[in-house]
Image (cartoon, helix red, strand yellow):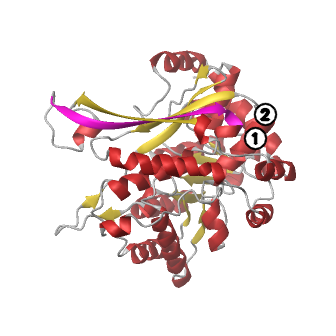
Amino acid sequence: MSSHEHQTPSMAATSILDNDLYKFTMQQAVRQHYPNTPCDYHFTNRSPRVAQLPIKAVPWLKKKIADMAQLRLTAEERAFLEVSCPYLTQEYLDWLQNEFRFKPEEQIKIDWHHTTASVNSSGPSAASQDTPASNTADEEVVEITIMGDWHQVILYEVPILALVSEAYFRFGDQNWTYQGQLEAAAEKARRLLQAGAKFAEFGTRRRRDYETQRIVLEGLMSGSRSQAGQGALTGTSNLHFAHIMKLAPIGTMAHEWFMGTAAILKDASLANQVALDRWSVTYPGQALGIALTDTFTTEVFLKSFKGELARDWIGVRHDSGDAFEFMDRIIQHYDQDALVGPEVRKTKKIVFSDGLNTDRAIRLQEAADAKGIQVTFGIGTHFTNDFCRQDPDHTASAAMNIVIKLHSCAGKVCVKLSDDSGKESGGPEAVAEVRRQIAAML
């Protein structure tokens, strides 16, 4: 791609709906249950040796974030939400349209600094570079902090991650092109449908840029139309693209719903049960009945997710740990529950959303078919940031591995344990406290 193409105006963050559905569903729930609760979020680049945001990208990033202050929910967008997301109440939509505004000048802090960091050969970033142990490497570190009442700042995470990724590929790694993206996405869709997989596009937060997501969705839709099978493109997590491309919006809740609940309760052992109960108050009748399991490990989650909860909720979402082991564990859990059992289990659903690609989704679909449980897939980076460099060998052009996590809520540090060792967040003392709280459940 030429440098001229990289400097064309970006469409990112030009619609308030250029965001994932679950940020809005959580915003509505937070307004109802935790209004005026102070919090902060922190940005982390998990693999700075692979991809660093250069300083020349920062002015563009800051301006795009500042411009979010101008975003409004339009009448047309509201009409779309009323039809496509009937679980969003009129009261919430009135507030979102008439009162909610991004205020980045007072809610966002962005710092950039240059640092020299030691490289540990046992770390994941070192493994991606052939750098000897005990060497040092220069890092260009961007620090982003989001601060404010939880319901007022909850919508920032996804668009800021998308903007950071786009900034990197606009001003840093420019050795790529859109060529072949439409066809590649169409082929992925054809293979998934042929295997009977039901899948949604979940790639907003780590997309290469806005245009990539648009092209990929066109390709997925094209491939889905051309391939017969039991599978289906079920929609997209991005509300803006769902609106303009006439797709179903997909999403429920994220880890922060459980993390914030635990911090507010000051007891992680109660958090899963309370978070699910309060979610059902906001979304009665299982309107959004897929439960995320791994915030404090799936083992702890399943101690609460039994009886009426297991029976009534539509299913669960997997987002860390071994996916095939998770499937077996969930089947066993349902089968051993007196209010579920093997027959009702066949109506339950597992949503897989952790680091999926086409091959992995197909293998999981085959396993689910053999074991007798319904599955769907939320596929992100594999769709919206799957590129090769423009070199003779067409080597992979790595996506940024970036996250924004809820750091504190109601004055207490938030913790996520995960089913993957090493992915926990919250700091050593806070993590140790949560582990003590949940120990009695195990």
Three-letter code for the amino acid on which mark 1 is drawn? Ala
Where disc 1 sits, the SS reads helix
Q: Which residues are magenta?
A: 135-151
Label number found at residue 344: none
How many residues crowd mark 1 within 10 Å: few (<14), some (14–19), many (20+)?
many
Image vertical order of residue 408 relative to residue 108, above or below: above
Image vertical order of residue 280 relative to residue 149, above or below: below
- The residue carrying mark 1 is 29
**Relative to 15, 164 lies left or right:** left
| Residue 275 percent location from the top left of the image | 71, 34
User: Between marks 1 and 2, how big is the CA–CA gap?
Assistant: 6 Å
Instruction: Specify the quadrant that holds the C terminus.
Output: top right
Q: How many marks on residues?
A: 2
Write the residue at 76% across / 44% down.
28
Three-letter code for the amino acid on which mark 2 is drawn? His
Write the residue at 42% across / 64% down.
358
Write the residue at 16% across / 27% down.
134
Q: Are marks 1 and 2 in contact (CB under 8 Å)?
A: yes
Image vertical order of residue 427 relative to residue 308, above or below: above
- Residue 169 shows in the view: yes
- The residue carrying mark 2 is 33
